[in-house]
Image (cartoon, rainbow, N blue to C red):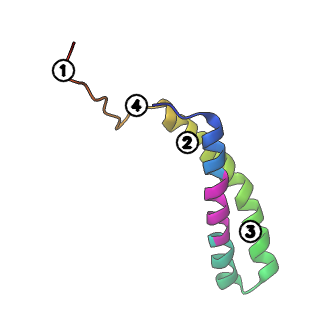
Amino acid sequence: MHEKPFRSIVKTISWRALGTMDTMIISYFITGNLKMAASIGAIELFTKMGLYYFHERAWSKSSFGIVKTTSDYQI
């Protein structure tokens, strides 16, 4: 099985949207400042999106934890 890079891009965007909302909520609780929370979330959005994409592509090249099934039945 092989994942195309576009799949990694879509997964990256959806995961970062969720993660950034979480970061902004936590930042708001810590700082009490909505503008500061949005700033932290905006910076984090781009840096972590890039990191996740390259992390995902590296894992897609790895065979770690993938088991190839073999069939005992042959014709």
Instruction: Tell me the kind of residue under disc 1.
Output: Tyr
Q: Which residue is mark 2?
A: 56
Is tag 3's residue or tag 1's residue first in the polypeptide sequence?
3
Q: Which residues are magenta?
A: 13-21
Is the residue 38 above or below the residue 44 in the image? Answer: below
Q: Is residue 15 magenta?
A: yes
Closer to the observer: label 3 or label 2? 2
Earlier residue among tags 1 and 4: 4
Residue tagged 1: 73
Residue at the (74%, 68%) spot, across then down: 40
Whole-percent x, y for residue 41 in the image: 73, 67
x, y percentage for residue 35? 82, 78
C-alpha span from label 1 to label 2: 35 Å
The label nearer to you, 1 versus 4, is: 1
Magenta stretch: helix, strand or loop mostly: helix
Mark 3 or mark 2: whose residue is earlier in sequence? 3
In the rendered image, which residue does mark 3 sit on? 40
